[in-house]
Amino acid sequence: MANFFDDIMGMLSTDIGIDLGTCNTLVCVKGEGIILSEPSVVAVHKGTNKVLLNGQAVGNIAKEMLGKTPGGIAAVRPLRHGVISDFDLAEALIRYFVQKVRVYKGWKLIKPRVAISIPSGISTVEKRAVINSAERAGARRVFLVVEPIAAAIGVEMPIQEPVANMILDIGGGTTEVAVISLGGIVTFKSIRIGGDEMDEAIIQHMKNTYNLLIGEQMAERIKITLGSAVPLDKELTMEVGGRDLVAAKPRKVIVNSEEIREALKKPLNAIMDAIKETLEKTPPELSADLINYGMVMIGGGSLLKGIDKAIAQEIQIPVKVTEDPLTAVAKGTGIVLENLDQVQESLESGEDLM
């Protein structure tokens, strides 16, 4: 009876799927697809944690402030390594997106059901923090779906069939690798290494090699422009500006793709080790499937030049980057909301964590 009334209320509300990422948050509406994609950043007054602009200094507005704020203002990421590091600001972030969707769709009396993706390795306490934040932000009911399942659903892998579906999600704060069969995760590895660690490796390289201090946004631009996992047909260069650590003055240097590839070796090796560990724990019958079906890559890290080739060469199975790797998880949360009855066993809610 409770589910019947929940379904009726679902018809009267705007159900929302959220890919709550360390770097970016994507929001989809059931039946419509992705309607929002903004950075997971909140701008606050230091000391009070009060969000600027009447709670609206979130997402794109807040990211523009990163590294450029005056003394009394901070631009903060409420999530680190895929989990909430600041509960109050995470709630502000979720509320901002929920309210933005409800305004976009027209205010409805019934609060929305919300499906949120989470890393597969997080604790019960961390899961409860996500649910509490979403409920306080205006959700009627919250469903948690682990990222590998959401991603596999989003790229339409046949996860309900008795075959191996292997997925690799390299996000901003975490990397998730999993083998899925018969609707569940058979084996997985979640490491708190992703795009942020690649950016940090580039920042450290610039310090050590050039005595040049650069910010997060510049490191990300270098990664996107020059970063690669294999030698390029034509190596690239770009001009990089920052602050000289010795002279304390602005300075520019020319950086090439070969040195950035070397700088990225440590985080890339950690990701490769996670893949190998997952394969080692995979049952033989499913391992045989992977020779034919291979592995699908999603997440921003899968856009690093040549990373699919490097992984395929190392593990000797086919590797494919999905067509739109940045949206796979968010699409999966939307599909989950449309098929709650069929995927209920793959989800967790507040009642499950009591």
Image (cartoon, helix red, strand yellow):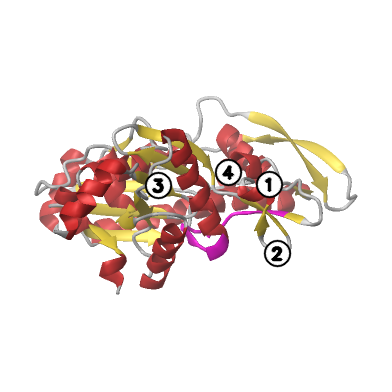
Q: Residue at 35% x, 30% y: name it.
A: 323
Q: Are the residues at dot 2 and dot 1 in contact (C-beta closer than 8 Å)? A: no
For marks 4 and 2, the one nearer the N-term is 2
Quadrant where the N terminus is found in the figure: bottom left
Q: How many marks?
A: 4
Q: Residue at 82% x, 46% y: name it.
A: 243
Q: Are the residues at dot 3 and dot 2 in contact (C-beta closer than 8 Å)? A: no
Question: Would you say residue 82 sits in the magenta stretch?
Answer: yes
Question: Would you say residue 232 sits in the magenta stretch?
Answer: no
Residue type at mark 4? Gly
For marks 2 and 1, the one nearer the N-term is 2
Residue type at mark 1? Leu
- The numbered mark at residue 48 is 2
* Mark 1 neighbour density, 10 Å: few (under 14) some (14–19) many (20 or more): few
* Mark 2 neighbour density, 10 Å: few (under 14) some (14–19) many (20 or more): few
Reading the image, the residue beneath label 4 is 59
- The numbered mark at residue 53 is 1
For marks 3 and 4, the one nearer the N-term is 3
Q: Magenta part of the protein: which range?
A: 74-88
For marks 1 and 3, the one nearer the N-term is 3
Q: Identify the secondary structure beneath mark 1.
A: helix
Reading the image, the residue beneath label 3 is 18
Q: Residue at 23% x, 53% y: name it.
A: 6
